[in-house]
Image (cartoon, coloured by chain):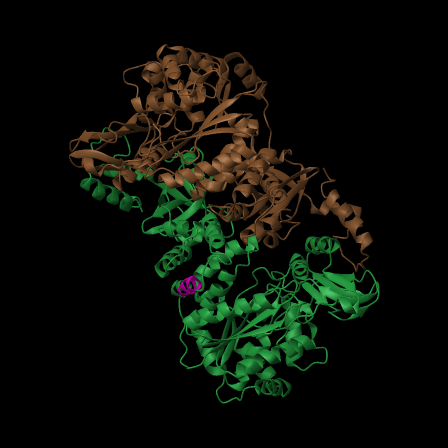
Chain colours: A brown, B green
């Protein structure tokens, strides 16, 4: 471990021989003196602080080796031990309990990623700027970049070379309208290349995806068992919630294990034609996960990123045919038909360059889909639809059947227009439920009584302030309240919707119930509702209409 | 202090009365129950970690009150105690020594800013997004913003409401070419309005500024005493180095105290017609200081920011007449004459809207000015020029006289073209030196022997690799090496240049010497030189020529 500073020293000696220098006495940093190398080493320790997505390195203010102040103005420094390297932000410590003068500390995740034992020797140096920073600045200055530029940038991003500030700069500089369609293709292609790529031993591998923004919209958990029951190969990997109260992976996790090794997943797909797993372990388009760390706190919805993120994940997962759900509505991501059409064209162009067959479906995004919002509540809705339970939310059922029908029509043996009826038959006959149970059991069922989904023990009902008709429901507000209530981290927290668009209500009648497990969560949710509960009550004539494909 | 959570609760109660809600039992977060308020409070402590420009709040993972995980995905949370509020990023702690389950910790600077005693009770809530975030997103989407938008954004920025990610988004979205000249004026005006504005009891208040990027360019410390000796009022406040190895404030601090209260400064200016102080205490254009925290690590040089930053600081400082030094050269901020002319026009437009008389001077930015780079070495050069010492660097002397001359020509009693001769006479007669000594003594002289500036005890000479002529010197590389050697934090670290553009050298002759105080600093500087020492040796014909006003 004492060789830690070796490579840097070696590089110095090699390069200075080409450019001769006269060295005047340098008491303890002379590159030639072997024993002095040790002087740059500190003892590694883990600091018990979880700094979330940011690597942090801790040095004592009176560190014996480094002038910690000299590093502080920098965005990043590099910690090196043997062949292990990590870049991190510096925090300067004034308490020797946290790190001593002869120690170097790393935050919990950074320590884990660094992969070196506590007590080992490590040294520090000023981090180089990422190799692609020149390309980033050309983009900031409005230039059009080429394929190689995007590959270089994405390689640095997935390698953790970009600071949050640099990441933000990239995302803003490549935001809506800043990239032409070929640049979006280059970016998508680079994102696929940055990670693993799965291959399935079949000609047709189907998938579905929604651009997001609609709470409760858990159609994948219905579409997948339906199309698999029809015989299509649908190895669905999903993300966890990013800004929403639940992702498909969070909701599926209520019912089954979703954290599966790739080999086990392949086995399940071979046997059942489908899976509903978390995609996080598969290293698909890893640059996307890094970019999300900035998109999320910024709530940035960039068309560019949306297209590159979705299509790169799908192509990397080995999909050949994709149904894309594109909801429009006043509080959806896409507000109107012209915007939806523009987005559809861009998706279609990039998909075709990536050799992916794409069917974009424009749907009703004026309100949440289903009743439950939050992992447990959404799982309840999904199971009710599969079980043909009369309490099943009809909008979720109807939309899922339409999407499944469109996907079934990818099958060359199915006549255009027949998909919906086939899907409905699979659902009503109980074959979809049987397929779902098979998938759940294969992935590892969670054992609890599906009849009695245990919702959060605290609850609060939000009521109508006046008589009238529900004429608008704000998706963003509903999602925000459900998140504040604890979803998705608290699986049984969220919202249960009792009134939807077009429903007549009387003052004091419940619009929705909030469920929470922790008092502070419920309080935050109630406070948010007090500022606006997301519902507009008015007259029938005021209800917003929108273009819908079905 | 137990009333800490009062205001939030109050707001809740007030608002829910307007929107009636049915509350089902909420064991310990019921808004109505007075005693439960206390349940949201934690004991405040300072955590001995210096997180630089980022406020960090520490909660134990098993905090008794809050589900710390629920906050973690967020960019920011708000800490509240009585009327004190601060927004901060959350770090989750797993060691009760750092913060206990009933405690809430703040990083050193955040604790200081919060201004509440350790042991007091504090509560936490999800931070609201800044009020101006809508305007930011309109700018990200390419819209033109209006005066009120810029005032709202700048108010939030100077109030610390923007996270680093949001700040970066603003800087990139308002980067070169994204703002028209009126928008740059709105931004400048908003930046002036965000802080204090000084008023001097005279018609004409002169100032000079350089857009930066040229190491060693310490002309202010010569121009100020010369023009003050002529009788102009020149209350110069300067910044410390941002990305350079020394700012005027850092260099002046070698000779005198620069950290002066506004009253004392006004007294000195009244008596001596000038000062050379640090502007950081005066709260002038505070939004600028916040934006620098992102511009620095990104190395972003945005024209927009440059104009708004410089002009807002000058107007806020009460200047009426400004000389602006705009150097051009291959490694200067401005590379060529057309770019310089465009920048000049923009500066002139915004200055005229701000009622500031502006004289832009385009200068030679092909290499560092003077010999010394770093606070102590630059102070040495300045004093040699003032003392008419034969060792004085002639380029620094010549440039300073020209700028002083142009400034003297603001005086309506001076004929156009006479300024240079007047400035030279003031310098050669020793009146400039006398004025400088008076300013130094008034601000509080540092006592050391000016004949023997004590340079860093470690040094290393960088030598020519071949015979030939110095045909290029890279400003950025020279600045980087000087910073790695320790400048400006280590005042006597830096570079002493021995050969300049057009000088003939033989292989092995010294190009420059590096001075450092700490072995690790010298090593970092030497390693950087090994990758390129910033000098190009070639033939006379290859030397770059550039348009110069003098």
- The residue located at (33%, 22%) in the rendering is A398
Residue A499 in picture, x, y percent from top left: 24, 29
Identify which residue, B324 or A412, lies in the foreground: A412
Identify which residue, A518 or A25, lies in the foreground: A518
Eyeballing the image, is A372 above or below B542? above
- The residue located at (42%, 44%) in the rendering is B76
Residue A439 in picture, x, y percent from top left: 46, 15
Quadrant housing residue A242 = top left
Start-end of magenta stretch: B182-189
> Position of B100 compared to B2: left or right?
right
Residue A432 in picture, x, y percent from top left: 40, 14
Q: Magenta-highlighted stretch: main secondary structure? A: helix
Residue A238 lies in the magenta-colored region: no
Residue B183 lies in the magenta-colored region: yes
Residue A530 in picture, x, y percent from top left: 25, 40
Does residue B304 appear in the picture of this structure? yes
Eyeballing the image, is B483 above or below B122? below
Q: Quadrant of the C terminus of chain B?
A: bottom right
């Amino acid at each position: 471990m004492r060789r830690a500073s070796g490579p840097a020293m070696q590089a110095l000696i090699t390069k200075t021989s080409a450019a001769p220098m006269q060295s005047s006495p340098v008491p303890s940093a002379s590159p030639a003196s072997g024993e002095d190398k040790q002087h740059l080493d500190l003892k590694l320790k883990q600091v018990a602080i979880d700094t979330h997505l940011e690597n942090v390195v801790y040095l004592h203010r009176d560190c014996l080796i480094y002038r910690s102040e000299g590093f502080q103005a920098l965005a990043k420094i590099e910690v090196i031990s043997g062949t292990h390297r990590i870049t991190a932000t510096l925090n300067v410590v004034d308490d020797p309990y946290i790190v001593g003068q002869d120690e170097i500390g790393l935050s919990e995740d950074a320590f884990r990623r660094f992969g070196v034992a506590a007590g080992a020797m490590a040294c520090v140096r000023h981090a180089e700027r990422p190799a692609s920073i020149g390309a980033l600045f050309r983009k900031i200055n409005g230039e059009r970049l080429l394929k190689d530029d995007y590959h270089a940038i994405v390689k640095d991003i997935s390698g953790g070379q970009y600071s949050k500030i640099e990441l933000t700069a990239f995302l803003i500089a490549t935001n809506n309208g800043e990239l032409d369609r070929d640049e979006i293709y280059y970016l998508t292609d680079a994102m696929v290349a940055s990670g693993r790529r799965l291959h399935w031993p079949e000609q047709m591998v189907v998938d579905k995806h929604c651009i997001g923004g609609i709470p409760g919209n858990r159609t994948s958990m219905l579409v997948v068992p339906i199309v698999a029951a029809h015989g299509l190969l649908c190895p669905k990997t999903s993300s966890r919630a990013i800004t929403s109260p639940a992702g498909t992976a969070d909701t599926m996790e209520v019912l089954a294990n979703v954290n599966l090794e790739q080999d086990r997943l392949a086995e399940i797909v071979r046997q059942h034609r489908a899976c509903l797993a978390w995609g996080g372990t598969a290293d698909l388009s890893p640059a996307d996960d890094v970019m999300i760390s900035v998109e999320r706190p910024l709530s940035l919805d960039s068309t560019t990123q949306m297209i590159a993120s979705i299509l790169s994940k799908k192509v990397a997962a080995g999909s050949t045919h994709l149904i894309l759900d594109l909801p429009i509505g006043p509080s959806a991501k896409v507000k109107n038909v012209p915007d939806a059409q523009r987005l559809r064209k861009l998706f279609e162009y990039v998909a075709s360059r990536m050799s992916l067959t794409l069917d974009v479906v424009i749907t009703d995004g004026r309100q949440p889909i289903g009743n439950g919002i939050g992992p447990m509540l959404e799982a309840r809705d999904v199971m009710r639809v599969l079980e043909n339970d009369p309490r099943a939310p009809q909008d979720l059922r109807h939309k899922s059947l339409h999407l499944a029908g469109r996907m079934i029509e990818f099958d060359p043996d199915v006549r255009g227009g027949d998909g919906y009826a086939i899907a409905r038959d699979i659902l009503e006959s109980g074959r979809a439920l049987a397929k779902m149970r098979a998938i759940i059991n294969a992935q590892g069922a969670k054992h609890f009584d599906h009849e009695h989904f245990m919702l959060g023990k605290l609850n609060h009902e939000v009521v109508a302030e006046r008589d009238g008709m529900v004429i608008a429901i704000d998706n963003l507000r509903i999602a925000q309240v459900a998140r504040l209530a604890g979803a998705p981290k608290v699986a049984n927290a969220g919202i249960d919707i009792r009134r939807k668009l077009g429903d007549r209500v009387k003052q004091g009648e419940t619009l929705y119930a909030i469920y929470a497990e922790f008092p502070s969560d419920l309080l935050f949710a109630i406070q948010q509702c007090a500022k606006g509960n997301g519902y507009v009550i008015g007259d029938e004539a005021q209800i917003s209409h929108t273009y819908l494909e079905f």
